[in-house]
Image (spheres, helix red, strand yellow):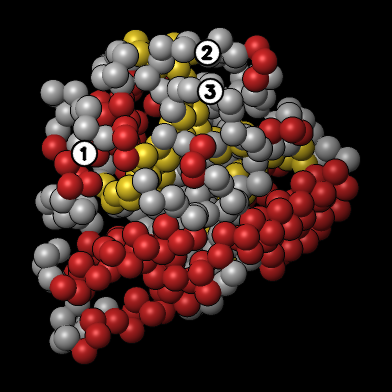
Amino acid sequence: SSQSALNFGAGPAKLPREVLSEVQNELLSFKDSGMSLMEMSHRSKEYSKINNDAQNAIRQLLNVPDNYKILFMQGGGTGAFAAVAMNLMNRTGSADYAVTGTWSGKAAKEAAKYGKVNLVFPKADKPGSIPAESTWTLNSNASYLYYCDNETVDGVEFHYIPNSKDVPIVCDMSSSIMTKHVDVSKFGCIIGGAQKNIGPAGVTVVIIREDLLGNPMQICPSVFDFTHINKENSVHNTPATFSVYVMEKVLQWIKKNGGVAAMEKQSAEKSKLLYDAMIQSNNFFSCPIDEDVRSRINIPFRVGGPQGNEELEAKFLEEAEKLKMYQLKGHRSVGGIRASLYNAVTSEDVTSLVKFMEEFKKRYG
Ligand code: PMP
């Protein structure tokens, strides 16, 4: 049936239906051209406009200051882990990493191929907390301090921007971009894959302070070279034109729906619905993450008590699918359930999930 699913996937994830239907309308003939945008040159005036409109939308939505450049790259978030090191580590040869979960862990590992990586606190056996900032060991000669704003797998989110003194901050916002206000001027560089809050897979957004450009490592491939990509206005080679096109539409959708402030308000409401339901359940549904670092966006929980009951969890997923609630399985590395509440996921979607949880507990709790 064409009834839309309730999609709680971690990424690629739910996109606004309005955007998909607009894409559908234009699929065979983009603006009366008689061809699809997919079939057009990345140097056409049509694509140039999309490229520029998308940049401008990001600049407007996030209030990006003039001395920051906005780039569209390929290689995903993972490609950006390497790109960050190759573009920014040259200054001192080392960088500080705050590893709070899976993705910052992978970023640190990738960066270690290109220079010296210092972990600012020892790696926790089990993520789910962030050590107090006062205990971090920062190095004043680090090229940058890196952290992941929202750990998609682990459900750990920073609710503040760390103080790095004069060291530029590099932040992975793949799963939190456009879900809350951020003061871009506090960052040296922001990276984010589009495939969660702002579009389909295939394009990675990089926002970078101008003065950090110009010092890539010799070995940096040109497709990962921020300085070069900026010079070429993100059309150095063929970009993921269709992905940028859909992303541009999602960005306009965010603007039309009240911008980042409205997304932030809804994000608070949606995550509260789910966390409140867990409290109501007396730990039948139970979130393993420290309260002060719980994510508003990717919410992991166990079913049947804090340790989780795998049989009940399998049943939970099976019954959820019967109600067309999909992609709720926790990441393979942590198990349990995970609900991802990106911008396109509505409060009604979350209310349906919460109702199902209450009903499930009545039967199995
Ligand atoms: N960073 C974060 C926070 C992520 O959630 C992900 C993907 N889930 C990545 C990086 C890696 O992105 P990609 O799969 O595009 O390489």
**Does the beta carbon of the residue at mark 3 sit less than 8 Å from ligand 1?**
no
How many residues crowd around disc 1 within 10 Å: few (fewer than 14), some, or many (20 or more)?
Answer: many
Residue picked out by circle 2: 138
The three-letter code of the residue at mark 3 reads Ser
Disc 3, SS: loop
The three-letter code of the residue at mark 2 reads Leu
- In-front residue for pair 8/2: 8
Residue 32 horizontal side relative to residue 330, left or right: left
- In-front residue for pair 124/176: 176
- In-front residue for pair 140/267: 140
Residue picked out by circle 3: 164
Quarter holding residue 287: top right
Counting from the top left corner in percent of width and height, residue 316 is at: 67, 49
Q: Residue at x 28, y 51 (%)?
A: 72
Disc 2, SS: loop
Q: Residue at x 65, y 12 (%)?
A: 135
Residue 138 horizontal side relative to residue 217, left or right: right
Q: Residue at x 32, y 40 (%)?
A: 210
**CB-based contact (under 8 Å), mark 2 and mark 3:** yes
Residue 197 visible in the snapshot:
no
Disc 1, SS: helix
Residue picked out by circle 1: 227
